[in-house]
Image (cartoon, rainbow, N blue to C red):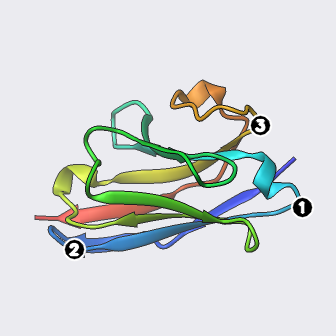
């Protein structure tokens, strides 16, 4: 089992940047595919980005490609989401999630563990 704690959210103006972090407990962090999802008020949770266990493979939602970068540091049990050129439509609660499958998946119900979320608000 793994516990996930997100941090780094906040209020930023459009065009600004934020870096989210997700710290995982346990000694098997490198066994998990890690993903970032977000949920805006009144909307369903949606995929943002995911990264393979080694970090060699990544996937992104079309809406964030070229602006967001997912990375991980297995020595620090942490996954990151670097966000640049933020837009008001990026406003949401951002969640990290862990999945024990080998392949990088993008569907929320494929993930086994979730953090509590961190709010990102982008003002226009």
50 and 15: which is toward the camera: 50
Kindly indicate the quadrant of the structure image that contains residue 46: top left
Query: Position of 51 compared to 70: left or right?
Result: right
Q: Nearer the viewer, mark 2 or mark 1?
A: 1
**Residue bearing mark 3:** 100
**Residue bearing mark 2:** 16
Q: Residue visible at 30% across and 63% down?
A: 121
- The numbered mark, 2 or 1, whose residue comes first in the sequence reads 2
Where residue 47 is drawn, which disc sits there?
none
- The numbered mark, 2 or 3, whose residue comes first in the sequence reads 2
What element does badge 1 sit on?
Answer: loop
- Whole-angstrom CA distance, mark 3 to mark 1, is 14 Å
Q: Quadrant of the C terminus?
A: bottom left
Crowding at dot 1, Cα within 10 Å, few <14 / some 14-19 / many 20+, comes out as: few
Q: Nearer the viewer, mark 2 or mark 3?
A: 3
- The numbered mark, 3 or 1, whose residue comes first in the sequence reads 1
Query: Position of 10 compared to 21: left or right?
Result: left
Crowding at dot 3, Cα within 10 Å, few <14 / some 14-19 / many 20+, comes out as: some
For residue 49, above or below residue 117:
above
Q: Residue visible at 18% across and 58% down?
A: 87
**Dots 2, 1 in contact, CB < 8 A:** no
Kindly indicate the quadrant of the structure image that contains residue 23: bottom right
Crowding at dot 2, Cα within 10 Å, few <14 / some 14-19 / many 20+, comes out as: some
**Dots 2, 3 in contact, CB < 8 A:** no
Residue 116 horizontal/vertical position (percent): 62, 54
**Residue bearing mark 1:** 27
Q: Residue visible at 27% across and 58% down?
A: 67
* Residue 36 visible in the picture: no
84 and 114: which is toward the camera: 84
């Amino acid at each position: 089992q793994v516990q996930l704690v997100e941090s780094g959210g906040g209020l930023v103006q459009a065009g600004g940047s934020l870096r989210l972090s997700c710290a995982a407990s346990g000694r098997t962090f490198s066994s998990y595919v890690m993903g970032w999802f977000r949920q805006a008020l009144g909307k369903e949770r949606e995929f943002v980005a995911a990264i393979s266990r080694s970090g060699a493979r990544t996937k992104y939602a079309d809406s964030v490609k070229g602006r967001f970068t997912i990375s991980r540091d297995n020595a620090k049990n942490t996954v990151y989401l670097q966000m640049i050129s933020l837009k008001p439509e990026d406003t949401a609660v951002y969640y990290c999630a862990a999945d024990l499958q080998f392949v990088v998946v993008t569907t929320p119900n494929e993930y086994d563990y979730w953090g509590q979320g961190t709010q990102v608000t982008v003002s226009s």
